Amino acid sequence: MKARSLKIANITLCLIISVILISWTKKDQNKKANPEPKEKIKVEEAQVFFYNDTPNEGMVHRDKLADALKHPLIVKDKNGKEYPVVFYQFMFVDMNIYADSTGRNIIVPEYHTGYGRKGIMPEDRWKFFDYHASFGDTLVIEKVQFLLPDSTLAEEYAKGMRIHIDDDE
């Protein structure tokens, strides 16, 4: 009788230990499968800027803007902290004057679009801009993606820029 009750106690003890070990390994597997999410870095009032003192809005002289486009863009937050730009889209609106069938002048916009990687506009695009830009044209830079300090891509775009070309210094 003692041997039988001892046998039952051993089996019960083995079952209890097995259940504890199984539940313990499942908890460990759940932790590995669902790691705790990192706290997302939030950048307040991220806005794109040129590398130098070229304004990022309003009227800008064409030569100053042409020079600024040869260098990488940067993003700054409201505290002035800088972040590298990874990608952006741009649109150059070239305003042309043509004569209609009656001889009256009409303004016809011509749109040129593209993108910049690593914050830099491709060389052929800034050369085109340098050659064609004149008073009244517009450059729009938008959908600016940038890297955070932990080298991850920011979830939101930085505020872009809209610049009107001026010929006067």
Image: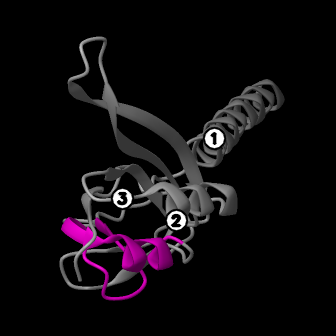
Image position, residue 15 (x, y; %): 71, 30
Residue identifier under label 1: 33
Residue identifier under label 3: 134
| Amino acid type assigned to the residue bearing label 1 in the image | Ala
Most extreme residue toward the top is 101
Residue located 24% across and 27% down the image: 106
Q: CA distance from mark 3 to mark 2?
A: 9 Å
| Amino acid type assigned to the residue bearing label 3 in the image | Ser
Task: Categorize mark 1 by other alpha carbons within 10 Å: few (<14), some (14-19), many (20+).
Answer: few
Relative depth, front residue between 136 and 118:
136
Image position, residue 80 (x, y; %): 25, 85
Relative depth, front residue between 51 and 15:
51
User: Would you place residue 101 above or below residue 105 in this image?
Assistant: above
How many badges with numbers are in the image?
3
Residue identifier under label 2: 130
Secondary structure beneath label 2: helix
Secondary structure beneath label 3: loop
Most extreme residue toward the front is 103
Task: Categorize mark 2 by other alpha carbons within 10 Å: few (<14), some (14-19), many (20+).
Answer: some
Residue located 45% across and 52% down the image: 37
Disc 3 + disc 2, Cβ < 8 Å: no
| Residue 117 visible from this viewpoint | no
Image quadrant in which the N terminus is located:
top right
Image position, residue 149 (x, y; %): 48, 76
Magenta-tinted stretch: 47-69
Q: CA distance from mark 3 to mark 1?
A: 57 Å
Based on the picture, tell me whether residue 22 belongs to the magenta stretch. no
